[in-house]
Image (cartoon, coloured by chain):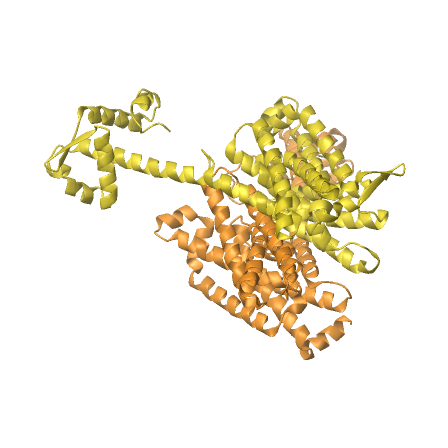
Chain colours: A yellow, B orange
Amino acid sequence: MNSPQIEIQLIAAVVAIACAIPGVFLVLRKMALISDAISHSILPGIVLGFFITHDLNSPLLIVLAALTGVITVILVEAIQKTGLVKEDTAIGLVFPALFSIGVILIAKNANDVHLDVDAVLLGELAFAPFDRLMLFGADVGPKSLWIMGTILLITVMLLLLFFKELKVSTFDAGLSSAMGISPIVMHYGLMSISSITVVGAFDAVGAILVVALMIAPAATAYLLTSDLKKMLLLSIVFGVFAAIGGYWLANILDASISGSMTTVLGFVFLMVYLFAPRKGLISVLYRQKQQRIEVSLITFLLHLNNHNEERERHINHLQEHINWQRVRSKTVLELAQKNNMITISNNIVSLTQKGDNFTTLALEYIITNKDEKIESMKDDFFLFRG
Amino acid sequence: MTITEYFYLLWNDYTLRTITLGTAVLGAICGMLGSFAVLRKQSLLGDAISHAALPGIALAFLITGAKDSNILLLGALVSGLIGTFWIRGMTKKTHLKSDTALGLVLSLFFGFGMLLLTFIQKQPNANQAGLDKYLFGQAATLVEKDVQLMIIVTAICLFVLLLFWKEFKIMLFDAEYTKTLGFNTRFIDILITFFIVLAICLGLQTVGVVLMSAMLLAPAAAARQWTNSLGTMIFLAALFGIFSGVVGTAISATQNNLSTGPVIVLVAAVFVLFSFIFSPGRGLLFREIRFRKNRRDLQLKKTLQLMYGIAKTHDTISHPHAIKILNNFHGFTIGTLKKLEEKQWISIDGRQWAMTQKGFEEAENLYNQQKPNE
C-alpha cells in the first residue's frame, strides 16, 4: 500500500463517520430524505461560492453552500406550513428547482469556470490526495482530509455536548420543550450540521453517495438495535467498513470508488435486512407464519370446545367446516396433538383436559382482552411466547 | 435564435419538432400520473425510482451490448420496479419508515449504477458514450422512434386510466372501503405503480435522473391548487405538463448553453409558484384577502355590539350619542364608523351617532346563530 492509497482510505473513513452521526438522527426523526434534498440543492450555493472564491475547498464556499442547505430546509418547511401540498411533495418541489438553477448557472458560465455537474453529483475520491494543504510551506496532508477532519471534530464535540438534548428532542419533542430544550433549536442545529457535512463531503464522494453514507449505515444499525448509543456506534462501524471495503472493491474492478462504497453499503444493508435476528425480513416472515398457525390452532380448539356432537368433530368435517386446506389442517392437528391438547380416536377429535383448560383461558382472554388472564400460561404454552 | 424564429422552425425543422413533441408528450403523461403520485402521498417515489433505474440501464447495456433505447428502457423499468417493491416491502415488514426506505433505495441503487457505469467505461469494447446522458438528460438525443414510443405508452396509459377510472378513484380516496367492496386492491395498486414507474423511465432520457421527480410532481401540485375534482386535476396537470415541456424547450432552444431538462423544471416551478399564490380557492393571496376581510368584518361587528349595548339602555334606539364615548378597544376607527353608516346600521350627524332600526336588529341577531337568512 502506498501513501495515496492510505490517504484515500483515511479520507473515506473520516467522511463515513462524519456522515453516519447526523444520519442516525435524520433516520430516527424520519427526515432521511432531507439529506437527499440538501445534497442536491447545495449546487447553486457551491456555484455562487465558486464564482466568488474560485476555490472548491475554500471555507467561505462551504459556509455559503451550507447556508443554501439550511435555506432549503426553511423553504420546504414554509411550503409545508401553507398546507397547500403534502409534506413530501414540498421536498420534491424545492430541491429540483434549486438544482436546476445551479445547473443553469454552471451552463451559462461554463466557459470560464472549472466546475461541472458530474463532479458535484458523483465526486471522485481518487483525486482527493493530490490536492494538498500547504502550511508554512510544508505539506501537511490532503486538503479534504483536513476539511472533513475538522467537520468530524465539530460534529463529535457537538454530539457529546448535546447528546441528552438531541436524544430527548428526537424521541419526544413535547417532553423536550417542557424541559426547556427547544426542539426547534435542535432541529436547525442538526440541519446545519447535516448541511455542512454534505457540503464538505460532496467533492470527495459526490452528492448521491453522501446520502447513502448518511442513511444506509443508520438504517442498517436501526435494524439491529433499539439503543441510541449502540446505534451510533454500529452505524459508524458499518460506515467505516463500507469505506474501506469499497475502496478495495473499486481497486479490483477498476471502477468508481464512491460507487463501490455504496455497493458495499447496499450489500451490508441487504444482508442485515434479510438476516437481522429480530427485525430482519426472514425472522419477521417466520414469526408471522408461526403466529398464523397459532391463531389457526386457537380457532380449531375453540371450534372443538363449541361442539360436542361427534359429527362436528370428525376430521373430514373440520376441513370443510373451518374451510382450511388439507395441509394446513394437518399441520394444526399435528401441532395440537404434539402439545397434548387433543386426542384422536376413530377419526373423532376430542379435547384433553389440558386442551380444555387452555381453551377456557384463551376464551376468557378473548372476551376480556386483559393480559393477566394469560400471564400464567405464557410459560406453559408455546402460544404466547410473543 | 429568437422566439419567432423558433416557432417558424418548429414547422420546418425535424429535430426541433421531434424534441418539442417529445417533451410535450412527456409533460402530459407525467402530469397525468403525477397526480396519482401526489394524491397517494408518494411524491418522492419518483425521485427514488428515477435513481433506482440507473443500474437497470447499465446492466441492460452490459448484457446486450447494444445502445438501443428500448432495451435500456426495459432495464430501467425492471430495476425501477424492483426498487419500488423493495421500498414497499421494507416499510411493510420492518420498522423502517418510508423516508428511510426511499432514501436507501435511491442512494444504494444509484451508487451501484455508478459502479456499473464506471466499470463499463473501462471496458475495451466501450461504445458506451451517451449512457451518462441518462444522468442529466438530453432532450436533443430524442429521435422520432422515442417520441413514437412515448405516444404509444401515453395512449395505453390513457386507455387504462379510463378503463379503471372508477377503481383508481375510489382506491385513491378510501383504500379500505375499496377492499370491502370486493375490488382487488393489490392489482389496482400494482397497475398504477407500474404506470408511474413506466412514465419515470420514459422521462429519464429527456430530463435525467435528478430532475425527473419534479417533472412528475410539479404539474400535479400546481393543478391541485385549482380544483377539487380528480378528473379536472388530471386534465389540468397534463396541460401544465405540456406547457412546461413546450415552453421549456422553446426557451432552451433560443438560448445558448441551456440544457432542456433544468429549464423545463424551472418553468414547471413557475407554474407551481403562480398556482400557490393566485389560485382563487386555496391560493395564498386570496387566503390572505379573505383573512383580512374577515378580521375587518369582525371589528365592525364588535363596534356595533358596543353601540347596541349603549342604545339598549335608552328609550328610543335612535337616541344620539357622542362619538367620543366609543374607543379603540372596541375596534372603533373613523373607517369602521363610515362603513357602519354605509351599511345603514347607524346614522352620523356631526360628532354624534345614532343607531338605526336596521342596525339594532343586526346587533340583536349577532349572537343568534339560528338566524335563517345568514
Residue A376: give x, y in percent of width and height.
31, 19
Residue shown at the point (49%, 37%) measured from the top left: B95
State the count of labels: 0
Seen from the viewer's position, the closer of residues A214 and B63 is B63
Evaluate whether residue A82 shows in this view.
Answer: no
Residue B316: quadrant of the picture: top right
Name, please, the residue furthest toward the front.
Answer: A1
Quadrant of the rendering where the N terminus of chain A is positioned? top right
Name, please, the residue furthest toward the bottom.
Answer: B12
Evaluate whether residue A146 shows in this view.
Answer: yes
Residue B258: give x, y in percent of width and height.
74, 63
Seen from the viewer's position, the closer of residues B319 and B374 is B374
Q: Compared to B143, does B73 lie above or below?
A: above
Residue shown at the point (51%, 35%) measured from the top left: A223
Residue shown at the point (65%, 47%) measured from the top left: A258
Residue shown at the point (37%, 29%) measured from the top left: A386
Residue B302: give x, y in percent of width and height.
65, 34
Residue B163: quadrant of the picture: bottom left
Residue A31: give x, y in percent of width and height.
60, 39
Residue A338 appears left or right of B140: left
Seen from the viewer's position, the closer of residues B305 and A367 is A367
Residue A311: quadrant of the picture: top left
Seen from the viewer's position, the closer of residues B357 and B327 is B327
